[in-house]
Amino acid sequence: MRKLGTPDDPYDVIGLGFGPSNIALAIAAQEIAPDRSCLFLERNPDTRWHEGMLIDGARMQISFLKDLVSLRNLASPFTFLQYEKAKGRLEKFVNLAEFRPTRLEFQDYLRWVAGQFAGVVRYRSDVRAVAPARGEDGGLSLFRVTVTDLATGDAVEYHARNLVHALGGVPRVPDAVTLGPTVVHSSAFLSTVPGSLTDHDRQWEFAVTGDGQSAGEITHYLLDRYRNARVHLILPGYSLRATDNNPFANEQFFEANADEFYYRNEANRRDYAASLRSTNYGVVEAGFLDDLYRLVYADEVRGRTRLVVHDGSRLTRAAADDTGVRIGVEDRFGGGTRTLRADILVLATGYRRELDPVMYRELLPYVDTDGAGRPVVSRDHRVRTTGELTCGLYVQGFAEATHGLGDTLLSLLPFRSKQIITAITKDGGSLARAVASARPEAVSDAATLVALIDGCGTGTLVSAGPGQFPVATRLPLVLDRGRGRHGVLFGVLGPADPQLPLLDGGRALVMFQPQTAPAGNPMFVDVRGCARLVTDRDRIAAHLARLDPAASGPAVGVELEIESLHGRYSPSPEPRVARTESERQS
Ligand code: NAP
């Protein structure tokens, strides 16, 4: 009997990590593609969500309605309200009139959902390596994931056609600083500091670095729990600042706006990301700032100052010694460097996100990167890889530069998980391979290919298909080079076209007739990126007006983002793979 997870019978999806992103993915997989085999690998013995910052009373910064699934499927059995009902607290929760539950309760919700997927999760599984592996077709169509089973110490291997990486960020630690008993990152705050500092009356000297929500909450915690302690807060700006959560700015976390963001050009994205930074980074929730200020003021009334703010400053070094830690603080405006001493330094310096170079050592050579060395990630969260690697690497939370600030947050999880599952379900990977082997004359240079496409005028979408099978659609397309990485192909369908459900989220093969190619030899372009149905009439009309001023707006448009291109001249006039659905069934 074949064993699931072996090269002969790989999983459809392996998820690395089982935090909010991959729990949302498990829900989406069950609701959208229940026939796909999934496995999730998680290092912890159960679901833990930023445990080091689960400070008593700390609240979510978003509404409970932004749970793992509600905004995608209100009828799902995995919504936050279903959780309240299952716990017998629904009426009491409603009675609270509270949109922002405590983080502790949200973790409990995550655990409740995770518990219902226990059969597809291997806890205590520490992922050590991800490497490409050869599938039945002889190509690099599989991932091999090597895991240490923390319960037994054994190394275990699993194989999959698709991998969804959702391992979260790693603590950002300034250069020349080493973590240790007296230098702690905020992510480990609760698991280290309260346990090691049990004397709550002592005149502790604490230092906290950073100006975000973590810095605010930790500073409040230390001043509140250690009544004689002093806290040095080292922050880069003039003062702590409030989170910009005005409803207009918050619209950036809407599904459609995240989509818009992706299709902006790079300079535009950078500019918008900078102007929206204060919706999330380096800011503290306004109500919480008021609480902190009240605490500080109460001290002033008692005639003492316990919060010392080192504004305009950056922490540059920290060296542990017998009495605690000596800290170098540099004035950002030329005022020199000074040294502070503290019993404990807490780095509330945030997180960085990158694919672990050790874990991904064997895979990284196949990953396309941008000018800044980041993996290039398509709209549907698939990492662009070289043509040799045909299995799908997806990432959750590692593409903020192209997908916007919502990429690392909870708001978009219901939508992102749907996009990934849809892409995996509709990925015509075998189609691309069939085309590749049938047509050896490839054009791999994207710029040349785009120029050829441009010269063709219109192209025809000849195939796109769910699962592993191509179907013919024959949709005329025109290229709009004003948007997207290489451009966006735009076509118009009748609203009742039976191909509509097949197109949405699907990969595509497009046929062009290049004027420079020998007559009868069309050029096939495997459009890596996804097809998106456009139903907004105004948007369709606007696209058409740009492309063909004489046209009027029909009901449904299709956009194909050209994300990565593999073009081939066909040696035969009729593509073997472009069979119709009826041919397939006969
Ligand atoms: P953050 O918002 O990224 O803030 C870290 C800050 O530390 C940055 O502004 C950074 O400034 C500063 N920093 C880094 N190195 C520094 C140095 N050497 N000296 C001085 N300052 C330095 O991190 P966070 O507060 O941990 O928040 C991360 C995410 O978790 C946010 O989304 C936040 O909302 C969330 N969070 C939520 C809760 C809650 O829901 N209750 C609690 C905590 C955190 P530069 O960028 O200029 O380097």
Image (tube, rainbow, N blue to C red):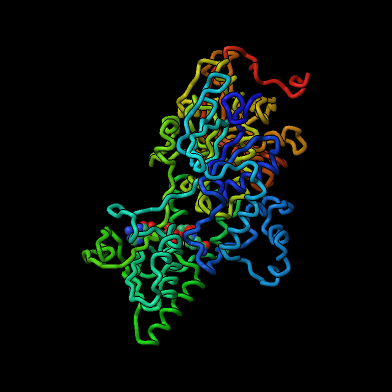
Is residue 480 visible in the rendered image? The answer is no
Q: Observer-nearest residue: 557 or 515?
A: 557
Residue found 60% across the figure and 36% down from its top: 13
Residue 104 in picture, x, y percent from top left = 57, 63
Is 418 placed above or below 286 here? above
Is residue 160 visible in the rendered image? The answer is yes
Is 37 placed above or below 568 here? below
Is 125 placed above or below 144 here? below
Q: Observer-nearest residue: 40 or 392?
A: 40
Residue 42 in picture, x, y percent from top left = 54, 45
Residue found 40% across the figure and 37% down from its top: 358
Is 368 placed above or below 438 here? below
Residue 546 in picture, x, y percent from top left = 59, 41
Q: Quadrant of the C terminus?
A: top right
Residue 87 is drawn in which quadrant? bottom right
Residue found 43% across the figure and 61% down from its top: 189
* The image quadrant in which ligand 1 is located: bottom left
Q: Answer with left or right where residue 565 lies relative to residue 475.
A: left
Q: Quadrant of the N terminus?
A: top right
Residue lying at the far front of the rendered structure: 152
Residue 7 in picture, x, y percent from top left = 57, 25
Q: Observer-nearest residue: 311 or 456?
A: 311
Residue found 45% across the figure and 62% down from its top: 190
Residue 26 is drawn in which quadrant? top right
Q: Answer with left or right where residue 116 lies relative to residue 276.
A: right
Residue 97 is drawn in which quadrant? bottom right
